[in-house]
Every structure is written in structure tokens, then in C-alpha cells.
Amino acid sequence: EFAAAQLALARIGRRLGDAAQHRRALVRAIQLLPHESPTRLLLFGGGFSAASLSGIAQAELAATRMPA
């Protein structure tokens, strides 16, 4: 239930070549980000706002749907 953790799981999935895990974690992060505490995001989100992280996650999710 922590958006930053889902973003970390997405990165791990991508690095391991697990496209399904990568996409699942991105989708969950996008769902959680609007409800995330700004203070918690400041501490664990690399200084990015929820809107910025959501935009990054959405762009990455869209890129996973593109043919290689």
C-alpha cells in the first residue's frame, strides 16, 4: 500500500525481465499515488511530487505496450 515501494518493485521487475511484474507494480503505483502522503513521498520518492511520479509511471507503462 506504499506507492514508492510499488515503483521499486516495478524497477526490479524491469531489471529481471519480468514484464508482467513490471506492469503490475506500475499500475498499482499509479493507483496509490493520488492518495499518498506528501511527507512520505518527500522522504521516499526522490523529491518528486505524486503528480510527477504518476506521470513517469504512466509513461513507462505506455512504453511497455510498444512493440520492440
Image (cartoon, rainbow, N blue to C red):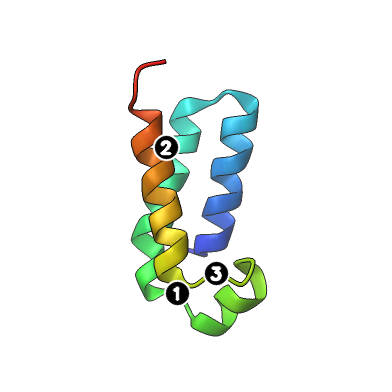
How far is mark 3 from mark 2, CA to CA? 21 Å
Mark 3 or mark 1, whichever is nearer to me:
3
At mark 3, the secondary structure is loop
Q: Amino acid at mark 3?
A: Phe
* Residue at left offset 39%, top offset 33%: 63
Image location (x, y in percent) of residue 12: 63, 38
Image location (x, y in percent) of residue 37: 49, 80
Asked whether disc 3 touches disc 2, contact meaning CB atoms under 8 Å apart, the reply is no
Q: Amino acid at mark 1?
A: Glu
Give me the disc on residue 11: none
Badge 2, how many Cα within 10 Å: few under 14, some, many 20+?
many
At mark 2, the secondary structure is helix
Q: Earlier in the sequence, mark 2 or mark 1?
A: 2
User: Where 52 sits versus 17, above or below?
Assistant: below
Image location (x, y in percent) of residue 41: 56, 74
Q: Earlier in the sequence, mark 3 or mark 2?
A: 2
Q: Is residue 4 left or right of residue 1?
A: right
* Residue at left offset 38%, top offset 40%: 61
**Which image quarter holds the C terminus?**
top left
Give the labeled residue for mark 3: 48
How far is mark 2 from mark 1, CA to CA? 20 Å
Q: Amino acid at mark 2?
A: Arg
Give the labeled residue for mark 1: 36
Badge 3, how many Cα within 10 Å: few under 14, some, many 20+?
some
Asked whether disc 2 touches disc 1, contact meaning CB atoms under 8 Å apart, the reply is no
Mark 3 or mark 2, whichever is nearer to me:
3
* Residue at left offset 64%, top offset 69%: 44
Give me the disc on residue 23: 2
